[in-house]
Image (tube, rainbow, N blue to C red):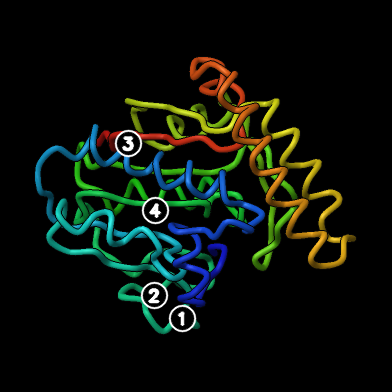
Amino acid sequence: MNEYRHNSSEAIQRTQPGWFHPRRYYLNMLRKLIEYAIEKHIPNKNGILVDYGCGSMPYKTLFETKINSYLGADLSDNPAIDIKLDAQGKLNYADSAADILLSTQVLEHVDDPELYLQESHRILKNDGLLLLTTHGYWMFHPDPNDFWRWTSSGLKKVVERNGFEVVDFRGIIGRPAMGLQLFQDGLMFNLPSPIKQIFIFIMQIFIHLFDKVTKQETKNTDACTFLVVARAKK
């Protein structure tokens, strides 16, 4: 259910991407987005966090000082999991038992986003915290499937429709920079190495520069990836 599912080296690249990584700027901004959510919305140490569709749990270390227990939930072929999902993606976990639910780049891959959000709501305590990131714009990337993209208003609507109150919403990488990212992705697979690496390195610099001219207010409505912070209401 998550990109880079079981490869620990790829998990490290998600938080520490190399200079020639084609997602270097994006992955750095995604890590900072999660750090922003932790700093702003988890001021004190909490109890149980469930990482729903955890893959290799690349962001686990970011939460170490903020929670008592970090539980990974995924399909049974992931050897690192604490909670097994059934064939429909439901959690084998008790109602109202978790304090925080983390979902990073999973929602676009699940067959039924409504069911996924309903399960998230079910296992969270009243006022439990949902931290969710997913794509606005992005290239097709099946793992094993890739079904969905959201506008900012559409993502808020589907989260609220399933029992949550959105308390924060933030986007990263605005339209100009994301246009360059898609341009890079459209060409790089046809380039030989080391031309490909040079091309990626240059494009990532321009993506960074173009993103700096886009206001945060604009990114919050139209962006590559959105963060939703929401409270479960029961």
Q: Which residue is mark 4?
A: 119
- Which of the two discs, 2 and 3, sits closer to the camera? 3
User: Which mark is first along the chain, 1 or 2?
Assistant: 1
Task: Name the residue located 50 percent from the left edge and 83 percent from the top edge.
Answer: 77
Mark 2 touches mark 1? (CB < 8 Å): yes
Q: Residue 200 appears at what percent x and percent y?
A: 72, 52
Quadrant of the image for the N terminus?
bottom right
Mark 1 closeness class: few <14, some 14–19, many ≥20 residues within 10 Å: some
Q: What is the distance, in whole Å, between disc 3 and disc 1 at their CAs?
A: 31 Å
Q: Which residue is mark 3?
A: 36
User: Which mark is first along the chain, 1 or 4?
Assistant: 1
Q: What is the distance, in whole Å, between disc 2 and disc 4 at their CAs?
A: 13 Å
Mark 4 touches mark 1? (CB < 8 Å): no
190 up-or-down from 37: above or below: below
Mark 2 touches mark 4? (CB < 8 Å): no
Q: Residue 207 appears at what percent x and percent y?
A: 66, 36
Foreground residue, 161 or 60?
60
User: Which mark is first along the chain, 3 or 2?
Assistant: 3
**At numbered mark 1, what does the secondary structure look like: helix, strand or loop?**
loop
Amino acid of disc 2: Lys
96 up-or-down from 166: above or below: below
Amino acid of disc 3: Tyr
216 up-or-down from 132: above or below: above
Task: Name the residue located 30 percent from the left edge and 59 percent from the top edge.
Answer: 50
